[in-house]
Every structure is written in structure tokens, then in C-alpha cells.
Image (cartoon, helix red, strand yellow):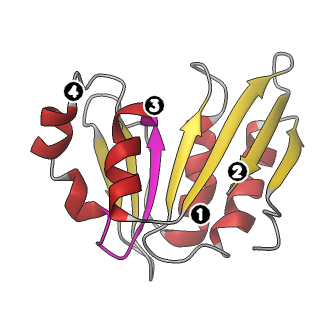
């Protein structure tokens, strides 16, 4: 991937810039790629997913899946599955939502609060990108992307 050479660091000064970075990145992703999104609340994770959706599912409206656990965006060629695992308490719940099936569903998986899913993803052998968001001010973000 051109945008990800082992480990890259990007700066974003607005939600729009975060979305544009993710949109460019999405064009380089292969189906069944998993993106682990790490960062504190309000650090840009959902904005990043909006950017992914702009490229992958352009006619879908993106919202945080906090209460739904997963939102599916299928209006494009490659589906985007946006997970928020914050409220899940264990692997039983992860399996209860059918998570393993998503790993081979031909889409891109963007996972907020991914710790619970890491072992399942490792066992499945999916390609993984790790994206970490660090606030540097009211709107500023450092975004670290690594394979």
C-alpha cells in the first residue's frame, strides 16, 4: 500500500482532513482487511470511518454503532462493516453477533475498541491495519497507521 509503508504518521487539523485521509486509504484496501481503530473518545475514529465509507459505500450515511455494535454499509462494490466493541463484555458476545462470519464476508472491517476482537482476527489470518488517533488540540490529530 502506498499510504502505509510499515508505519506512517499523518497530521489532521479537521474532521474533513481525517475523512480525506481515510478515503484515500480505502482505495488501497483488499477485501477482508481489518482496521483496528484506537484512540480516546472524540479522537476521530468515526470521522475516519466516514472517510472509508465515502470511498467504499458512497450513498450510505455513517453513524457511530455504539448501541448497534455493528453498522453495515453496502452501497458500493466492497461492503464496509463498522464495529464498536466498547459495550461488549466478552468473547461470547463477540461470537453472538456473528463476528467471525464478517471476517470472511468480502468487506472491510473497521473496529473501534478492538481489543476483544484481536485474537479472533489473528486466528482468522486477516490482513490488519492499526490506526491510532492522538489529540493534539481542539481539532488537531496525529494519526498513526501501521500494518
Residue that mark 2 sits on? 19
Instruction: Give the Cα separation between the discs numbered 1 and 2.
Output: 8 Å
Q: How many numbered badges does the structure rendering display? A: 4
Which label number is shown at residue 54?
Answer: 1
Instruction: Give the Cα separation between the discs numbered 4 and 3.
Output: 13 Å
Q: Residue 95: percent from the left, percent from the top? A: 15, 45
SS at badge 2: helix
Residue that mark 3 sits on? 113
Which label number is shown at residue 90?
Answer: 4
Marks 1,2: beta carbons within 8 A: yes
Label 4 environment density (alpha carbons within 10 Å; few <14, some 14–19, many ≥20): few
Marks 4,2: beta carbons within 8 A: no
The answer to whether 44 appears left or right of 112 in the picture is right
Q: Is residue 84 above or below residue 39?
A: below
Instruction: Give the Cα separation between the discs numbered 3 and 2.
Output: 19 Å
Q: Is residue 106 magenta?
A: yes
Q: Residue 141: percent from the left, percent from the top? A: 81, 30
Mark 3 or mark 1, which has the lower sequence index? Answer: 1
Which label number is shown at residue 13?
Answer: none
Instruction: Give the Cα separation between the discs numbered 3 and 1.
Output: 22 Å
SS at badge 4: loop
Please state which of the two labelled residues, at mark 3 or mark 2, is closer to the viewer: 3
What range of the chain is rendered magenta? 103-114
Mark 4 or mark 3, which has the lower sequence index? Answer: 4
- Give the camera-side residue of 47 and 39: 39
**Quadrant location of residue 30?**
bottom right
Please state which of the two labelled residues, at mark 1 or mark 4, is closer to the viewer: 4
Amino acid at each position: 500500500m502506498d499510504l502505509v509503508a510499515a508505519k506512517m504518521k499523518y497530521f489532521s487539523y479537521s474532521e474533513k482532513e481525517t475523512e480525506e485521509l481515510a478515503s484515500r486509504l480505502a482505495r488501497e484496501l483488499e477485501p477482508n482487511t481489518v482496521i483496528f481503530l484506537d484512540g480516546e473518545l472524540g479522537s476521530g475514529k468515526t470521522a475516519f470511518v466516514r472517510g472509508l465509507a465515502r470511498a467504499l459505500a458512497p450513498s450510505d450515511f455513517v453513524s457511530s454503532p455504539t448501541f448497534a455494535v455493528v453498522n453495515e454499509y453496502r452501497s458500493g462494490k466492497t461492503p464496509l462493516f463498522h464495529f464498536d466493541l466498547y459495550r461488549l463484555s466478552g468473547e461470547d458476545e463477540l461470537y453472538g453477533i456473528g463476528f467471525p462470519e464478517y471476517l470472511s464476508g468480502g468487506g472491510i472491517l473497521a473496529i473501534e475498541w478492538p481489543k476483544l476482537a484481536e485474537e479472533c482476527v489473528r486466528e482468522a489470518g486477516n490482513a490488519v491495519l492499526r490506526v491510532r488517533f492522538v489529540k493534539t488540540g481542539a481539532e488537531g490529530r496525529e494519526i498513526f497507521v501501521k500494518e
